[in-house]
Amino acid sequence: MSESTRDRHREPGLSIRLRLALSYAMFVVVVGIAFFVVGFLLLRFVPDENIVIFDRGTAAPNRGDLLEVFVRYTLVALVLLTVIGLAGGWFVAGIMLRPVRRITEASRLVRDGSLDHRIRLPGSQNELAELADTFDEMLDRLHDAFEVQERFAANASHELRTPLAVTSTLLDVALRSPDDQDYPRLLERLRTTNDRAVGLTESLLRLADANAVKAVMTHVALSDLVLMSIGENTTEADRRDVTITTGLEPTTVLGDAGLLAQLVTNLVQNAVRHSGKGGSAHISTRSEVQRDVVALRVESTGSIVDPDTATRLAEPFLRGAGRVADGEKGSGLGLALVERIAAVHEGSLAIEARPAGGLVITVELPAAGSKRHPAACIRQ
């Protein structure tokens, strides 16, 4: 069994800074000794006898005199070089290791759970800067991976609530009056609801990975998805006395059919549930050839929403004041999921508040044949 990292014990040793300082001092001393050897070899060419300079009448120092002075000052110089090497090496090593300390501190913070911390090492490009940048990129990917997991859990709990609630209701009704049930029809409804939950789960799993979404992209008739979603929500719209009108141009986009169906369903349900009693919703699709996009626009009545709040309604768990459907409090993830689906399809979401109350929500997606998507990602 491999040794646990937490249980690993290391013997105390010299710090990297001290090792570098000693190495620098040793290098300086070795250079000093080399100069000493060169000087000593040069002194061999000096005669050992006393040399008399005739024009001055004085005697020049011989080899022994020069060696005595040379050795004395060389020893002093070597001591000074050792001190200077240690001090200079300690100082230079401290400067060179400063980025390493910064990386180590960032690693400790990440180890303790601070995934938002980044090194952001200043200065020009070098080996340590490359290490710090690579570490920051790793943290970005790790942070994104955790966000994907959290987003999937939140979206799954939000979107699977409806099919699970339908299943629970059907089973409760069957248990209360088992003799009055049309079991073939009940089983068919349960199977349909279960298939919807399975398909939704698969779509959310693909949503967790944008590459997986692109791998299943195909041509999707957005206007047909709108008609299908309106049909599925007709009963609820009648119950709430909400009038739905349409202005649908035939539009085709590139994307994941399951996720785009969820996007449309969330927008239609949002309009039906928040338009208010006797309210209205107008849903339209149009192609903007010049911009190579398809626009899905949902304008609905409802409570007055502050413009600043409206622009932030796509944030998870954020709901506008008064936007509660007859006592049914949503989790605030519907529009967040819409924005995420639009983003992985390289589209956009815009939310505006209507002065008279309600919202105007516009989703723009690349049209079929758009250059935003590589042809390799399209399944015919």
Image (cartoon, helix red, strand yellow):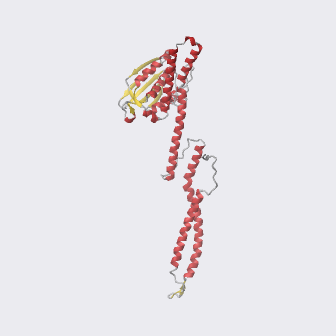
Residue 319, visible in the rendered structure: no
Image quadrant in which the C terminus is located: top left
Q: Looking at this rendering, what residue extends furthest in the front direction?
A: 1
Quadrant in which residue 220 is drawn: top left
Q: Would you identify the image quadrant in which residue 79 lies?
A: bottom right
| Residue occupying the point 53% across, 33% down | 151
Residue 42 pos. (x, y %): 51, 77
* Position in image of residue 241 (x %, y %): 50, 15
Q: Position of residue 244 (x, y in %)?
A: 45, 18
Q: Is residue 258 above or below residue 16?
A: above
60 or 96, which lies in front? 96
| Residue 323, above or below 57 | above
Q: Is residue 256 left or right of residue 102?
A: left
361, above or below 45, in the image: above
Residue beneath the point at 53% across and 41% down: 142
Task: Work out whether residue 96 or residue 262 is closer to the camera in this orientation and state it.
Answer: 262
Task: Say how many tags the image has.
Answer: 0
On the question of residue 24 being in view, the answer is: yes
Nearest the camera: 328 or 228? 228
